[in-house]
Amino acid sequence: MAGRGLPIRDDVPASELRRLARREADRNAAARMQAVAGALEGMSRAEAARLAGMERQALRDAVVRYNAEGLAGLYDRPRPGPAPRLDEARRAALRRLVLDGPDVEATGLSAWTLGDLCREVEARWGVRYHEGHMSKLARGLGLSRQKARPSHPGADPAAREAFAKDPMRRRTAERR
């Protein structure tokens, strides 16, 4: 009942595949190279797969890709990931919103916080974001975290300005 396995291209010898596998940084690709090399050397497919730490079906899939694409077929393909929740136009609008700042009369805010941005995005476009993800989104838009400098309500602006102009002279005068 056991038939002959799927033929494997032999343009790269098994010894070369093993040498490439030893130098390969991608562990999955190296395992596939080792398994294909074992099958090329005459091992059973099940044994070659077991020694490489994979299932026989995974080896068969690797052989199919190796036959079609060569060594490039043994590497993982890029995964697309989920689609962004805000399209390009809305991300550009969000960037403009942050750069323009909040409308103080309408919102009562003097500066955007991540929580405020999350609520604004949800109100405008119906898309929910966690504050941590909003931070990543803002950095992806080329925006950096800004922090307002605290100011005491009883501080003297004239004294602060004088200190800012020449702090060393004032310190020297205080020491005398």
Image (spheres, grey):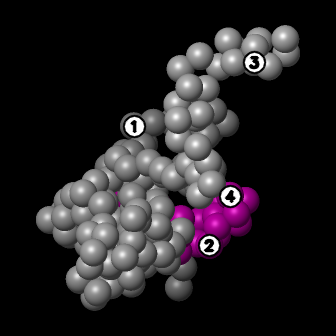
State left or right for residue 66 relative to residue 85.
Answer: right
Q: Amino acid at mark 3?
A: Arg
Mark 4–mark 1 CB contact (< 8 Å): no
Q: Amino acid at mark 1?
A: Asp
**Relative to residue 40, is residue 98 depicted above or below?**
below
Q: Position of residue 71 (x, y in %)?
A: 42, 43
**Separation of marks 4 and 2 at Cα, in angstroms:** 9 Å
Question: Where's the C terminus, which quadrant?
Answer: top right
Name the N-terminal-most of marks 1 and 3: 1
Q: Of tags 4 and 3, which is closer to the observer?
A: 3
Q: Residues within 10 Å of mark 1 (few under 14, many from 20)?
A: few
Residue 52 marker: 4
Residue 171 marker: 3
Q: Position of residue 83 (x, y in %)?
A: 30, 73
Is residue 101 among what the camera can see?
Answer: yes
As helix, strand or loop, the secondary structure at mark 2 comes to loop
Residue highlighted by disc 2: 55
- Please state which of residues 29 and 81 is positioned toward the viewer in this rendering: 81
Q: Amino acid at mark 4?
A: Ala
Prevalent SS, magenta region: helix
